[in-house]
Every structure is written in structure tokens, then in C-alpha cells.
Amino acid sequence: MSQKFVSRGFTGKRERAGGQGARVPPGQHLVSDFPVLSAGPTPRTDLARWTFTIDGLVTAPVSWSWADFQHLPVQDFVKDISCVTKWTKLDTRWRGVSVDTLFEHVELDPRAVALIASCDGGYTTNLLLSDALNGQAFVAYEYDGKPLAPEHGGPARLVVPHLYFWKSAKWVRGLRLVNKDAPGFWESLGYHIRGDPWKEQRYTDD
Amino acid sequence: MNDNDVVRDLTLDGNAVAGLLEEVFGADMTTADGECAHCGSANAVGALRAYTRAPGVVLRCPACGGVIARIVQTPRGTLVDLRGAAHLAMRR
Ligand SMILES: [Zn+2]
């Protein structure tokens, strides 16, 4: 939490000095388009067969159909996002369900400290619970007022805007609670286990 | 830009990363034969699907889509994951 206040203080000072530049983390540049990055082909998931599951270290796993997921309390989010390939996009507009809301439906085992997000196509990424809760992460299914396009991760993607965007897993289908923060797809091959753009945590040991 | 343009743009073959592979392996790899550890199919490395608009390069099997190789270049070196390749055969 203290970290948050420190960076807010910085933002205030730099905002007066440099406008939008104060919102751009070190080593990043602003873009106005929305680059598409992908480690594999774009899956086309039939919504009739789509499910979202929370399992692992929970008392009882929970799974929603697409229709059920649409009935969960929804929120709008306007967030700046930063990709490790060095682009930053300001004020991206999303609609989705916060991870906090999803976790209201499960009882976490006290040993749970992290989660691994799994996706259609086999992609995974890891997150500490301390990076997933308190409004910091959500599962988005609309972008800019429209259903989230498949190339941007639709039907639904995890969005964790305070970390590099590889953490915002496209085509997300579930979160598994685990007792150890174990590296996902990119974190296991040279990328930072956490990936905070303001600390330039790009690669392992940064 | 419609979906199909985007997807087509992202899907290259192994020949598109010939230079990177030569840097990593010290030889032209595009004509090397690779066996997919997931499904057993054999393909020239140049015929694998290559995904390069990503934090690293991902080579996938054209038959099953499984990941055959991942290559990440960082300021401190190059990392290569070949768990998805049962073997690679380089010609002399
Ligand atoms: Zn295969």
C-alpha cells in the first residue's frame, strides 16, 4: 500500500512538469493504437462452451458459464497499460468483473498466496494475491464499449493494469489458487516474476 | 483492420526467424528437421509456425499447434526452451 502513495506523490509532481509524460513508466513510449501481441494463434471459443473456473486452494471450486458470468456485478475501468515491448497506452476503457467479486464466491485456503491464470491456447501467467485483490485486477469482456475482440483476448481477458501487460492474459478461462508464486509462460523464460513497469521489472533479476 | 488481417499478420513461418536461429545455433536451422514432442510429426524448422510479435519468439508445430521452441533475448543473454522438440537434425 505504501508503494501506491509513493508513486502517487511522484505522479503529482511530474504531472505539473510534464503532462501525460508523467504517466509513462521509465523506458516506455506512448502509442495511440492498440498493438496486438500473441504467442500463438487466436482461439475462437464457442460461448456456449465457455466456462470460467476458480480452483486449486479453495474450499470448493466454482465455475460459471458465459451466461452466468454476464450476471456477475460488472464495473467500468479506465486504466493506463504498459507492455514490456515498451509501448504504453493511456486511458484504456474496459468493462468486466473484478477479481474481488469473483473471489466472493469461493473460500480461500489460508495457504493460498498466488494464482496462476490459464487460458485457451495454453498460455499461463502467475500473480501474487497481493497483486490481484483490492480492485487491482479484473476479467474484462468489453473494450471501448464493444465486446472484446478475439485478437485482444476476447471473449474475456484478465487485466492487471499495474503490471506489464503480459500478465493481462488473453482468452482467460480460469484462476488456480496456489501456495507458491510459480512462473507462468513468459516468467519461466527470462521475464520478471512480478513485472512492475514503474520499477522496470522486465527481466528476471531486474 | 479486420480480425483476419491481424491474425495473418501474426502468423509467420520459421524462415522469418532464420537470422535469430542462426545466431542462437550457429548454423542455418531452416532446413533442419524437427520432431514435435507433443504429436511426433516431423517438419523442417522453416515450416514451423512462428509468432514474433510477442515478448519472445515462439515456434509451434504446424500439425498440433504445440510449442516446439521459445527464444527470449534479454540484455543479459539469450534463453532457449526446446522442451517441445523431441529432436532436431541438422544437415551437413
Ligand atoms: Zn505437434
Image (cartoon, grey):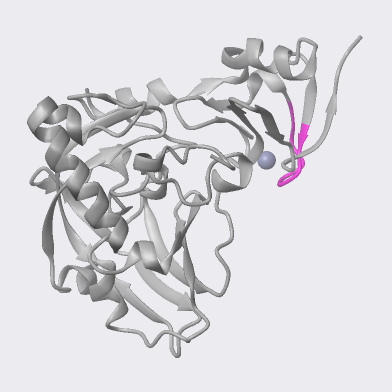
Q: Is residue B53 left or right of residue B28?
A: left
* Number of numbered discs on residues: 0
Percent x, y of residue A44: 36, 47
Residue at position x 25%, y 69% in the image: A134
Q: Which stretch appears magenta?
A: B35-43
Q: In the picture shown, does residue B32 fall above or below B35?
A: above
Percent x, y of residue B27: 80, 11
Q: Is residue A189 left or right of residue A68?
A: right
In terms of image quarters, where does ligand 1 lie? top right
Based on the picture, tell me whether residue A48 belongs to the magenta stretch: no
Foreground residue among B42 and A105? A105
Please identify the quarter of the rendering in which residue B18 is found: top right
Residue B30 appears in the figure: no
Residue A202 appears in the figure: yes
Residue at position x 39%, y 32% in the image: A37
Residue at position x 60%, y 16% in the image: B17
Q: In the image as oriented, which residue stretches furthest toward the right?
A: B92
Percent x, y of residue A157: 31, 52
For the N terminus of chain A, the image quarter is: bottom left
Residue at position x 53%, y 82% in the image: A111
Q: Is residue A184 left or right of residue A169?
A: right
Q: Is residue A108 left or right of residue B72?
A: left
Percent x, y of residue A160: 31, 53
Foreground residue among A18 and A36? A18
